[in-house]
Amino acid sequence: MNPFTEKALILLQSRGVTLDDIVDCVYYLQKPYHVNLQHKDLEESVLRVLDKREVWHALITAIELDVSAEKSTYANKDLEKIVQMDEGLYGMDEVLAYGICNLYGSIAMTNFGFIDKTKYGIVGRLNEDGKKEGVCHTFLDDMVGAIAAAAASRFAHK
Amino acid sequence: MNPFTEKALILLQSRGVTLDDIVDCVYYLQKPYHVNLQHKDLEESVLRVLDKREVWHALITAIELDVSAEKSTYANKDLEKIVQMDEGLYGMDEVLAYGICNLYGSIAMTNFGFIDKTKYGIVGRLNEDGKKEGVCHTFLDDMVGAIAAAAASRFAHK
Amino acid sequence: MNPFTEKALILLQSRGVTLDDIVDCVYYLQKPYHVNLQHKDLEESVLRVLDKREVWHALITAIELDVSAEKSTYANKDLEKIVQMDEGLYGMDEVLAYGICNLYGSIAMTNFGFIDKTKYGIVGRLNEDGKKEGVCHTFLDDMVGAIAAAAASRFAHK
Amino acid sequence: MNPFTEKALILLQSRGVTLDDIVDCVYYLQKPYHVNLQHKDLEESVLRVLDKREVWHALITAIELDVSAEKSTYANKDLEKIVQMDEGLYGMDEVLAYGICNLYGSIAMTNFGFIDKTKYGIVGRLNEDGKKEGVCHTFLDDMVGAIAAAAASRFAHK
């Protein structure tokens, strides 16, 4: 397994996200376009998205910003509050997500917008859990949505 | 009225899209976030999006590509067929749409992805009509979705 | 050779652009970062960029818009004039170019901005030739810059 | 003065960047296209860019990531090292910068790529200073380049 992929899976796991959770989102996005689609067909696409250096960099940056909000270690306390509250007009969580989606073309972008709004599966669970005291998933839910959207686009193009 | 806006409304009308059709899409996108939202509150945002030179340029380019497909005047007949059939992996319709959404930030992008998938209102009607013999809306449905998504983002930020 | 790559090389050749012309632009972009860089090291990266379906679609759409301007077959004569004159604020040529650059990440985008401004090599020659009567390269120079920028980014990441 | 603008100017000043520094970059970008261009003509455009909520959010996020690197308070020490060393393939500094440039269209993007490569004025000084022990400008130089590029695009469109 590619070194970025392995590290990404471990890091995601440490934040409560499994490979299966992401594959399930890809399935949700691709199911309307394929008969007899199997979860295992999609796993490869998720793993290949996680291979990429820019995906890894977006992921560690995103999780750093979430974890710092949980630990209240931001130097800028206004920003800390914005991230802790997952303020709707903040926008930088989506900007980092586009850093992933863009790599997989226009289909990845529309898929991301869709799952970000419908909050399917793990995307919604992360969003809900992020409202609990001491938990911040402001960036993580967008990362997971972006990785799933990218993998769905990759699968569609194959 | 700004000259771009006036020309854009006339051009959209000539392709079967009214200001109300677009406002209705913005309403669909913004309703979940506002109590007592009125259609007339959103009209201003659509008009302001249509003010922009880059929106006008995206719109005329998009409609040119649709109309040339209807008239079968493409120099490249492979491309003509792709546009006439609204091939799912073509992607340039979304690329032009992002040229509009990007101007209104990350919220515009997610809104576009959502309405592009749900095909609400005029977006869906254009898509359906585009399947008829001699009609091509490959680019137009994305333009309308992008304008509505941009207006929704603009409204959310005010 | 991948079918998209082969078709792309033939199409580019028909518009006066060779593989060597593009490799030379990649060399210009990557030379400052590598000792003993050879043109042949970069050729593979250009060929792999041309493999991608979205690159092919951007390229044929761009060239269609140039050729239609040369033949004066636009339905919208205002747009035809804008494209024929390569109007600086038009912007859709860059929007299509970003459809390519985005696929190769943030380094591709800065490389594109740089070569688009410095107009190195074939990018500048296309731009100059495009001012001649009956010749339109409004989109093509951006496509070539984008392909070179994408290939430079791909090479940098390897 | 708009509240975002005022806070942005104070924050930039605290990191060693003045309004004049940014205006000077805009001048560098726009001078080739205008006769008798004056620095004061461009100041308004910079101030208007700084009005925007998304620009403010990008700026505080970027500076937070720089400051945390200076203080070595990252939870993820691999990421801390990448940001401290301003690693060339990191890419998230440019991704945040595109969050600003995108709002001002395709011309802003090419301007950003150009100044990011030529490292004119304050962009280059920040980059150089960032190599000193205890100083990190990995994100800030891209923010300043993006604000200048956005202001140049805004000015060009007026």
Image (spheres, coloured by chain):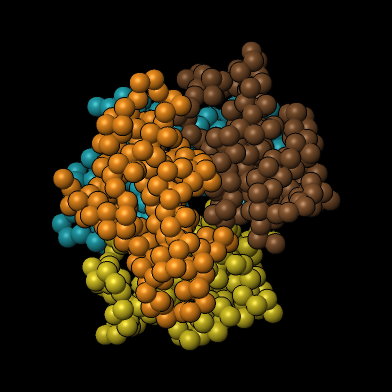
Chain colours: A yellow, B cyan, C brown, D orange
Which residue occupies the foreground of this view, B64 or D30? D30
Which residue occupies the foreground of this view, B52 or B61? B52
Residue D100 % position (x, y): 38, 50
Q: Does any portion of residue A9 appear in the rendered image?
A: yes
Vertical side of C87 occupied by D63: above or below: below
Tally of numbered tags: 0
Q: Quarter of the image holding residue D54?
A: bottom left
At a point 58% along the width and 43% down the height, the residue shown is C112
Vertical side of D40 occupied by C41: above or below: below
Residue placed furthest toward the top: C133
Residue D144 % position (x, y): 38, 49
Which residue occupies the foreground of this view, B133 or A150? A150
Residue placed furthest toward the right: C1
Q: Quarter of the image holding residue A23?
A: bottom right
Q: Quarter of the image holding residue B12?
A: top left
Quadrant of the frame with the N terminus of chain B:
top left
At a point 27% along the width and 58% down the height, the residue shown is D14
Q: Does any portion of residue B120 appear in the rendered image?
A: no
Vertical side of A102 occupied by D43: above or below: above
Vertical side of A37 occupied by B50: above or below: above
At a point 24% along the width and 71% down the height, the residue shown is A77
Residue D143 % position (x, y): 39, 53
Q: From the viewer's perspective, tell me whether residue D118 is left or right of residue C54.
A: left
Residue B31 % position (x, y): 25, 58
